[in-house]
Amino acid sequence: MMPEHSTHTVELLPDRVVKRFRGTDRAGAEREWRALSLLAVHAPGLAAEPWECDLAAAEPVVVMSRLSGEPMRGRPLSDERVGALAAALHRLHTAVPPEALERVPPRPDLAGELVARIHRWTPRTRPGLGGPVAQAMDAGLAWLASAHLDLPGPPAGPQVFGAGDGNLANFLHDGRTVRIVDFEDSGRSDRAFELAELTEHVASWAEHPLDVPSFLGHFTLTRAERARLREYRGLLALVWLFLLLCDARSGSRRNPLDAVERQSRRLRDLLG
C-alpha cells in the first residue's frame, strides 16, 4: 500500500543498497529483512540478497545487494513484460512453503484495516466535494457499506507471501526476467488481494496502462478468488480516490493533474 509519508531513506551504492528506516518503523525493517531472508532460501534471484542488518539501531538499517534492471513504471508494458511480471509474482506467491508461511505475520493494510482507514478519512475528505468526483465517492462508500469487507470470513484461496506494494516501480525488468524490491509491507496475504493491489495502483494506469485482463489471464483463479478479486479491486480503487484527493489538495505533483478525475471514472466503472 502506498504510504502516507516516507518511512525510510535509500542509499544506492555500486554493489549494494542501504535502506535506513525511521525509528518509528521498526516493523517495516523487520518485514524487509524477513522477506529478503525467506526469498534468498526459497526463491533465490527473485529479490536482493540480504547482506546485513541492524534492527536494534536508533534508525534500523538493512543492507542488500543491488539488482540490475529498470523499473517497470512509466514504460510501455509489452505482452512479454506483462508475462514476465506475472511470472515473478507467481513465483513470489508460491515460493514460501506452507509450514514457513504460517510463521509469517499478516502483511499490514489488508481489507479490514483499509475499511477502517476509509471511515477515518471520510469526515475530513468528503465535505466540499462536488460533481463526478463526489458521485464516485458516494457510490463507493454506499457499495462499501454493503460489501462487509471488514468482517472475518473464510479465505477465498490459499495464503501466499505478498510483497505488500503494487507499485510497478518496485518491479525491475532486465530484458528477460523481473525482480522485486521493497518488502517493508510484506507478509502473509491472499492472492486476490495482492493482484488487486497491483491492478489498482496508480502506477498501473497513470502513464502506460497495464492490460489488466491480459495480466490476470496469467493466473488460474478459483471462482471464489475471482469474486473476491472484484471486491478487493473496488476497495482499493476507493482507497486510491482518497489518496489522490489528498495528494491534489497538498499540491503534490507526483501524479498526473487529472488523476482524481480519472480515478473517479475507474471506480465507477469497477462498481458498474
Image (cartoon, helix red, strand yellow):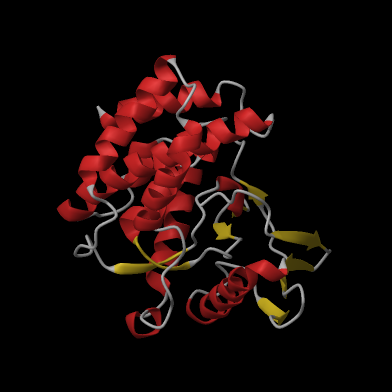
Using the image, determine if residue 33 lies above or below residue 180: below
* Residue 96 coordinates in the image, percent (x, y): 41, 76
Q: Can I make out residue 78 in this image?
A: no
Horizontal side of 18 relative to 247 (left or right) equals right
Q: Is residue 119 above or below residue 34?
A: above
Residue 63 falls in image quadrant: bottom right
Quadrant of the image for the C terminus?
top left
Q: Position of residue 137 (x, y in %)?
A: 38, 29
Horizontal side, residue 73 vs residue 220: left or right: right
Look at the picture and state if 254 lies above or below 149. above
Q: Position of residue 175 (x, y in %)?
A: 61, 50
Residue sitting at 61 percent across and 36 percent down?
A: 75
Residue depicted at x 80% and y 61% = 11
Which residue is drawn at the image coordinates 57% and 65% (left, top)?
A: 183
Residue 141 is at least partly visible in this image: yes
Q: Residue furthest right?
A: 14
Residue that protrudes farthest toward the left in the picture = 223
Disc count in the image? 0
The quarter holding residue 55 reads: bottom right
Q: Residue 244 at what x, y percent from top left?
A: 54, 33
Q: Which residue is found at the position 32% from the left and 47% from the top?
A: 232
Residue 221, picture quadrant: bottom left
Above-or-below relation of 227 to 151: above
In front of the other: 121 or 157? 121
